[in-house]
């Protein structure tokens, strides 16, 4: 059973979230307000194992964090393999990843949990039931999915289905019916334990041994589709990823680095298949890039549907900003007033944005508690960036009238 069968209307909701992210991305391109921001995503890895082999060491997870930071910042050594025809659109996503240092209760953590699980029927965790994401079904329940990127590592169906990982894209855009989203506990990424990192001692296959299954699945989690648009591969070129700077392709490039592949005709320039794109199914050894418009979608998603999982650091002027702690905003959802308070005395300023990144109001030289007047703003999702010295906190909140 696929997701559409499990939750009728799911595909329409995903389409709506993607199109909403495209609107935000276009707004960002027009005013470039968000270009200099680095988004740092707070991660927790849940290792769910049934034997010692599946209980991968911390060093493999740390390697995976390194891979993600290289791939999403375009610091990977194999950028030299990006073909000249695609170099003009290859882009640094400005997205970084780190292991959480506090758990949901505020206790110190290394960002890794370990659970001896009890999977069901496949002698592994069935991706169709998502059992690994629930303590009740033998896995481990997530940390709050609006604050952490949860990454589950397990044996997916004992390898019988050939699934290396999976993730659900955002489906809770603010222009949707509030009750239409999927279970929040399903938001995150699941990885087969042998494809985590690039230093695992017994990978499934050399073609998937560079840690890029996580790069690919997190791309889905941040709103990207497969570059061939999940077309049926019958030569009709009937799929699209909705992104203009990825060439058309008829089907996934399954575990191949065939630079001669050109399965669809593009106009006015007929590009080859972009086998180096992380959102293809190509060999890990030839994946090395996201495009600029893919980056725009992911960054827009981190401003909207996934805003709570990342901290924003502004590169221009205050590039070395750190997270502003001890700040609280309430109530959320709000009506006519939003209160800002601190656990200790602070002088600060704020900027209020709508979901398209447009500045609506701002105040500076504030001290301690302050009430922001929302009476002129319509219902919807908003962002507030609070700055004190070189510390910044960006929060998402909702106005309900």
Image (cartoon, rainbow, N blue to C red):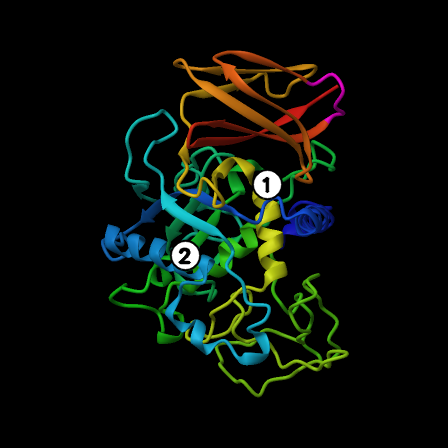
Point out residue 44 in the picture as x, y percentages from the top left corner.
Answer: 38, 42
> Is the magenta region chiefly helix, strand or loop?
loop
Residue drawn at (56%, 41%), measured in percent from left and top?
306
Name the residue at 36% across, 24% down.
105
Is residue 184 depicted above or below 236 in this figure?
A: above
Q: Nearer the viewer, residue 55 or 284?
A: 284
Q: Nearer the viewer, residue 343 or 121?
A: 343
Magenta stretch encompasses residue 380:
no
Give the image location of residue 210, x and y in percent. Answer: 36, 67
Residue under label 2, please give it. 68
Checking the image for residue 279, the label placed there is none
Label 1 residue SS: helix
Pair 2/1: label in front:
1
* Residue 191 can be seen, yes or no: yes
Few, some or many residues within 10 Å of mark 1 (<14, 14–19, 20+): many
Q: Tell me the residue at 40%/36% (across/down).
A: 135
Horizontal relation, residue 361 to residue 280: left or right: right
Residue 305 appears in the picture as rendered: no
Q: Secondary structure at mark 2?
A: helix
Q: Which residues are magenta?
A: 374-379
- In the displayed structure image, the side of residue 187 where residue 251 appears, left or right: right
Give coordinates of residue 360: x percent, y percent.
Answer: 69, 29
Between 396 and 318, the residue placed more toward the observer is 318
What is the spatial separation of the Cα atoms under label 2 and label 1, in whole angstroms? 20 Å
Tell me where residue 90 sits by quadrant. bottom right
Category of crowding for the residue at label 2, using alpha-carbon neighbours closer than 10 angstroms: few (below 14), some (14–19), many (at least 20): many
Circle 1 is placed at which residue position? 303
User: Residue at image x 44%, y 71%?
Assistant: 79
Which image quadrant: the C terminus? top right
In which quadrant will I find the N terminus?
bottom right
Q: Position of residue 111 (x, y in %)?
A: 32, 40
């Amino acid at each position: 059973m696929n997701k559409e069968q499990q939750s009728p209307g799911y595909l329409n909701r995903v389409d709506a979230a993607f199109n909403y992210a495209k609107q935000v991305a276009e707004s960002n391109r027009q005013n470039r307000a968000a270009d200099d921001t680095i988004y740092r995503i707070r991660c927790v890895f849940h290792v769910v194992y049934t034997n010692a082999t599946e209980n991968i060491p911390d060093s493999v997870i740390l390697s995976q964090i390194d891979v993600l930071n290289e791939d999403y910042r375009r610091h990977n050594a194999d950028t030299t393999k990006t073909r000249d025809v695609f170099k003009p659109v290859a882009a640094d996503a400005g997205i970084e990843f780190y292991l959480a240092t506090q758990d949901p209760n505020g206790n110190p953590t290394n960002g890794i949990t370990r659970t001896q699980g009890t999977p069901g029927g496949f002698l592994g965790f069935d991706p169709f039931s998502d059992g690994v994401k629930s303590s009740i079904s033998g896995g481990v329940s997530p940390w709050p999915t609006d604050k952490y990127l949860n990454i589950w590592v397990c044996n997916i169906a004992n390898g019988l289905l050939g699934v290396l990982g999976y993730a659900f894209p955002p489906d809770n855009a603010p222009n949707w019916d509030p009750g239409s989203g999927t279970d929040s506990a399903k938001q995150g990424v699941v990885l087969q334990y042998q494809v985590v990192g690039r230093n695992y001692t017994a990978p499934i296959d050399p073609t998937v041994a560079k840690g890029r299954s996580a790069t690919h699945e997190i791309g889905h989690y941040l709103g990207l589709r497969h570059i061939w648009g999940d077309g049926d591969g019958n030569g009709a070129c009937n799929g699209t990823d909705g992104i203009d700077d990825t060439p058309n392709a008829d089907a996934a490039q399954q575990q191949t680095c065939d630079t001669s592949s050109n399965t669809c005709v593009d106009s006015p320039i007929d590009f080859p298949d972009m086998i180096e794109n992380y959102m293809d199914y190509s060999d890990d050894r030839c994946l090395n890039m996201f495009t600029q418009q893919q980056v725009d979608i992911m960054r827009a998603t981190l401003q909207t549907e996934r805003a709570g999982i990342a901290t924003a650091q502004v590169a221009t002027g205050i590039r070395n900003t750190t997270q502003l702690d001890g700040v609280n905003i309430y109530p959320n959802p709000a009506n006519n007033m939003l209160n800002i308070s601190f656990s200790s005395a602070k002088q600060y300023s704020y900027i209020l944005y709508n979901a398209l990144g447009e500045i609506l109001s701002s105040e500076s030289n504030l001290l301690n508690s302050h009430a922001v007047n929302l009476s002129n703003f319509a219902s919807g999702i908003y962002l507030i960036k609070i700055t004190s010295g070189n510390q910044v906190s960006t929060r998402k909140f909702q106005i309900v009238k």
